[in-house]
Image (tube, grey):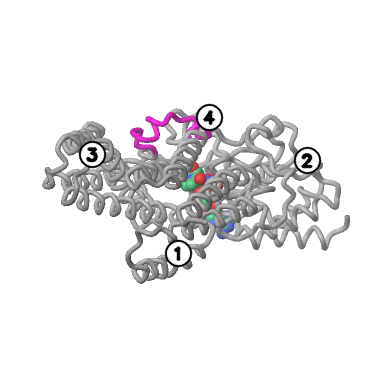
Amino acid sequence: MPTDTLIEITYLVATMLFILSLKWLSSPTTARRGVIAGEVGMALAIGGTLLYRGIVDYKLVAIGLVLGCIIGVPLGKVAMTAVPQRTALSHAFGAFCVTLVGTAEYYLGVHGSGIPAFKMSVLCCEVILGGLTVTGSLMAAGKLQEVLPQRPITYKGQNVVNLGLLAVAVGLAVYLVHDPSATHLYPVMVGIALVFGVMLVIPIGGADMPTVISLLNSYAGLSAAAMGFVLNNKLLIIAGALDGSSGLILSVIMSKAMNRSFTNVLFGAFGQVAAAAAGAQEARPVKSASPEEAAGILAAASKVVVVPGYGMAVAQAQHKVRELYDALSKRGVDVRFAIHPVAGRMPGHMNVLLAEADVPYDRLMEMDDINGDFAQTDVSLIIGANDVTNPAAKTDKASPIYGMPVLDVEKSHTVMVIKRSMNPGFAGIDNPLYYMDQTLMLFGDAKAFVSNIVKELSGGHG
Ligand code: NAP
C-alpha cells in the first residue's frame, strides 16, 4: 500500500477514535473507554505523521518526543486537586507549539515562494489565538496554583484597552494578509497577542477560572484547526475543531451553571467584592457537634443527602465517605449525593472522586434533580463544600456569588457541615448557612471526621 494511503487511513481511524472518545467521555460508565480511545487515536495520529515523507530528520523528532515525555509524565501524575492548573499548562504548551509552527511557516513562506492570502489569513488567526492562549493559560495556571494573586486586577477603562489591543492585532493581521512581506509587523502582531492573553485573564478571578480554562481550551483548539489549514493537514483541522467546539460547549454549560453570561464572565471582574465582604465579617455564634452526636443523628434519619466539595478532595476522604454510605445504607437509610456542577476545582471533580471510591452512579444526583428534594430530607451532610451551599447566592445582591445556582441544603431538617474552621471557601466569603438554627458544625478534617462517624456507627447498635 502506498505510504500516502496508509497515512490517510491512519488519520481516518484516529479521527473516528477522537469523535468516539468525546462521546464516551460524556458518561461516567463509558469514560474509561473514552480515555483509551483518545490515547489510541493520538498514538495513531503521531504514528501516521511519522510516516510522512517530508520529515528530514528523525533524530530531532526523537529528541522532541523524549523531551515531551519527560515533561508530560510527571504532569500526568499531579494530585487531582491540581488538575485544573495542569490542564491550563497543557493548553499553554499546545498553544506555544501552534504559535511556533505558525511563525516557522510564516518565515519559510515569506523568504521562499510567498504566502497566498488565504494561507496568510489562517496563519494570522493561528498565531493570534495561539499567542493569547499561551499567556492567558499561564496566567490562569498561576492564579489557580496561587503563585499569582487570585483576586481580579482591574482598572478604569480596562475593557477599552483590551478590545483596543485586540483590534490593533487584527488590524496588523489584515495588513499582513495584504502584504505578507511586511516582516517587521509580524513580531509586533504576535507580541500584542501575547500581551492580550495576560490582559484578558488578570481581571478575571475567583470562581470564574474554570470557565476561563475551558474557554482557553477552545481557543487552543481553534488555533490548532487554523494550523491544520496552514499545514494542509486534515486530521489537525478535525481534531482542532473538536477541541475548539467541545471547549466552547463546556464553557457555555459552566456559565449556565453559574447563571452568568459569557460577557459577564469575561468582563465582569468577578470576585471583586469578596475582599470587602470578608473584611466586614465578625465572629457570630455557631452550634457544633461531636462525631458521636453526628452518628446518632444520621442513624436516626431516613433520608440523607451528602454534599461533597473541595474539602473532601483535599482530605482524600472519598473512601471513608463510601464506608459511611455503606454503614448508613445497611441501616436502611436512603443516602444520595448532591453534585453541584462546579463543586471542587474542576468540572466533574466530585464524580471522579466518588467513582474512584465505587459509590454507585445512580446515587449521584445533579443539582437540578435534587434541589426539589431537600425539603423532604432529614439530614444534609456537607463534606468540605462551602460556596456551592451558600444561600447568599440567592438572597444577597451584594454577594460576589449572587445569581450562581446553589444547592438548597438549608431547606432540609438538619444540616451538618464538616470543615476544619470557619474559614471561607474559594470565593472568599462568609456562609450564612453556618449560623442558621438547623445547622450543626462538625469541626475537623473531613477524612478523620467521617472515619470517626463510621466507627461510631459500626461500634453502636444497628
Ligand atoms: P469551597 O467553597 O472552596 O469550600 C471548600 C471548603 O472545604 C472550605 O471552606 C474549607 O474549609 C473546607 N476544607 C478544606 N480542606 C478541608 C479538609 N481537609 N477537611 C475538611 N474540610 C476542608 O468548595 P466548594 O463548595 O466545592 O465550591 C467550589 C468553589 O470553587 C466554587 O466557588 C467554584 O466556583 C470554585 N471553582 C470550581 C471549579 C470547578 O470547575 N469545579 C474550578 C475552580 C474554582 P476549612 O478551611 O475551614 O476546612
Where is residue 421, by image quadrant?
Answer: bottom right
Indicate which disc, 1 or 3, sits on the residue closer to the N terminus: 1
| Residue 360: % across, % down | 74, 49
Q: Are marks 4 and 3 in contact (CB under 8 Å)?
A: no
Q: Is residue 239 magenta?
A: no
Which of disc 3 and disc 2 is earlier in sequence?
A: 3
Q: Which mark is drawn over residue 72?
A: 1
Say above or below: 6 vs 260: below
Q: Position of residue 219 (x, y in %)?
A: 38, 42
Bin the neighbour count of mark 4 within 10 Å (Cα to Cα): few under 14, some 14-19, many 20 and up. some
Looking at the rendering, the stretch of residues picked out in magenta corresponds to: 255-270
Q: Give the secondary structure at mark 2.
A: strand
Local packing at callout 1 (Cα closer than 10 Å; few below 14, some 14-19, many 20+) is: few
Q: Which residue is mark 3?
A: 116
Identify the residue at the far right of this view.
462
The CB of the residue at mark 2 lies under 8 Å from ligand 1: no
The location of residue 113, given as percent across then percent down, is 19, 47
335 left or right of 421?
A: right
| Distance (Cα) linking label 4 and label 3 | 55 Å
User: Can you identify the residue that label 4 sits on?
Assistant: 394
Give the residue pinned by disc 2. Answer: 303
Q: CA distance from mark 2 to mark 3?
A: 67 Å
Tag 1–tag 4 contact (CB < 8 Å): no
Question: Between tags 2 and 3, which lies in front?
Answer: 3
Look at label 2 and name its amino acid: Lys
Q: Which residue is at a point 32% across and 54% down the rendered structure image?
A: 96
> Residue at 56% across / 57% down in the picture?
40
